[in-house]
Amino acid sequence: MREQSGFSPAGPIPAGLSRSSLHDALQDPVLESISFLNEIMDRYPQSISFAPGAPNAGLFEHLDLNAYLERYTAYLREQRGMTRAQVAKHLYQYGPSQGQINALLAQALRMDERIDVADDAIVVTVGCQEALLLILRALCTGPDSLLAVVDPCFAGIAGAARVLDVPMVAINETSDGIDFDQLEQACRAARAAGRRVRALYVAPDYSNPSGTILSLNARERLLALAERADFLVLEDNAYGFTATPEAALPTLKSLDRATRVIYLGTCAKICLPGVRVGFAVADQIVTDAQGRTRLLAQELAALKSMVTVNTSPICQAIVGGMLLEHGGSMRALANDKGALYRRNLGHLLDALDRHLPPEAAQRLNVSWNRPAGGFFVRMRLPVRADAALLDDCARRYGVLWTPMSFFHLGHAGDHELRLSCSYLTPQQIDEGVARLARFLHDPRVTGHAA
Ligand SMILES: Cc1ncc(COP(=O)(O)O)c(C=O)c1O
């Protein structure tokens, strides 16, 4: 006989929840897209996948995390004068919400990017993703605070906005950056409706997903518009390290004379994603009702104390050790990684040229951009690059990519796909492009005979 428990004479009533009773963010099409991609990779494990933007596994082969921890603890003892007990506390206990490697990050930003900010203008976060969430939570106070997003955009920013119910306005990307007229118009329209564009999210250096770079002129124009229309710029610099020193443009933050820019960094690509360390530089002055001031980074740290409390001290120590091992410079730390990704990107573009020479590309009505850095190439097809086409491509030709529509806020990008070069070897890139070219030559796909 069934034992009775709880208040129901018939026994416990399981809490069967309907999906629609949960937050709308769980219905976000981005989540479906991510699980679809994972599922398709599992279904066709022999495929060559241009889908993941994850770092190259070869970079981790000789990582010695203990050595980095030792390097950092030696620094704490020798340069920060800590005792053994203080070092143990620093590493093993809860830590300050604002972070522990802020001084090292501030030094690296001065050295590498000519971004000159105080240590407490930085908050160290659990990946860049947490920084995005904290910033949106702090800036966007209700349905009248809008986030403008350069579209297509990194799924992480759209996801964070949806989790927090922050309304977004899509601003089209152009070949050298942003549709400024549209942005200005969006700010004006928001004001006319009693709302406000609080911030614009942009990745000016080889954006994810399209590899676009903002020209110097566009950077200056954006900063001037941010001042005029009174919004902040969220500058995500995840891929700037892949630029050659000659091609690198100054970051928006280094050009920012009016503290309009919040700069976002991630250690996922230049150290390792497993540490989950990122940071935000937020040197904007916040004044309270009594006229007392703090920096926005300190406010973000206060929010963080209610979210993840603090970023793992051990993970910060690994990043700190890596920086110290490279003379305190993020650029020096990123040098070999940047070179590897440029090599892979070069292989990808060469392979596309070889397997889809201009006459073939023209006949098939296929084209792609040619970024000089970053992980991504964006390709345009004469047919819809959707989930069904991807499934067909994986099943019959053993190659995977990401539909660009996954990165658009609206219904754009449905004839485009994203190819990522970061995760593969040069041999896999070549074979993958050969398969992709065979797929595109298939008359069933593009409607053209080979
Ligand atoms: C544009 C952009 N920002 C940030 C990140 C990394 O964020 P996190 O530090 O949370 O891993 C990525 C990774 O894919 C990215 O593409």
Image: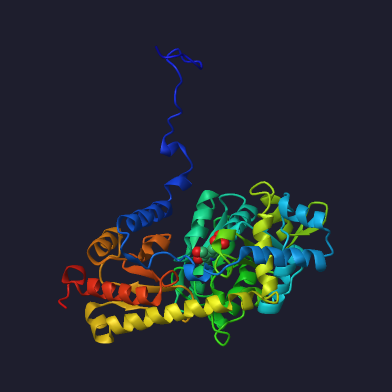
- Residue 390 location (% of width, % of height): 29, 62
Q: Is residue 5 above or below residue 253?
A: above
Is residue 167 visible from the viewing direction of this image?
no
Looking at the image, which residue is at 55% across and 78% down? Answer: 336
Is residue 425 visible from the viewing direction of this image?
yes
- Residue 230 location (% of width, % of height): 64, 66
- Residue 34 location (% of width, % of height): 41, 55
| Of 122 and 270, the residue lying toward us | 270
Q: Is residue 427 above or below residue 93?
A: below
Snapshot quadrant of residue 346: bottom left
Looking at the image, which residue is at 62% across and 80% down? Answer: 250
Looking at the image, which residue is at 59% across and 54% down? Answer: 133
- Residue 354 location (% of width, % of height): 30, 84
Snapshot quadrant of residue 42: bottom left
Q: Quadrant of the C terminus?
A: bottom left
Q: Quadrant of the N terminus?
A: top left
Q: Is residue 163 above or below residue 349?
A: above
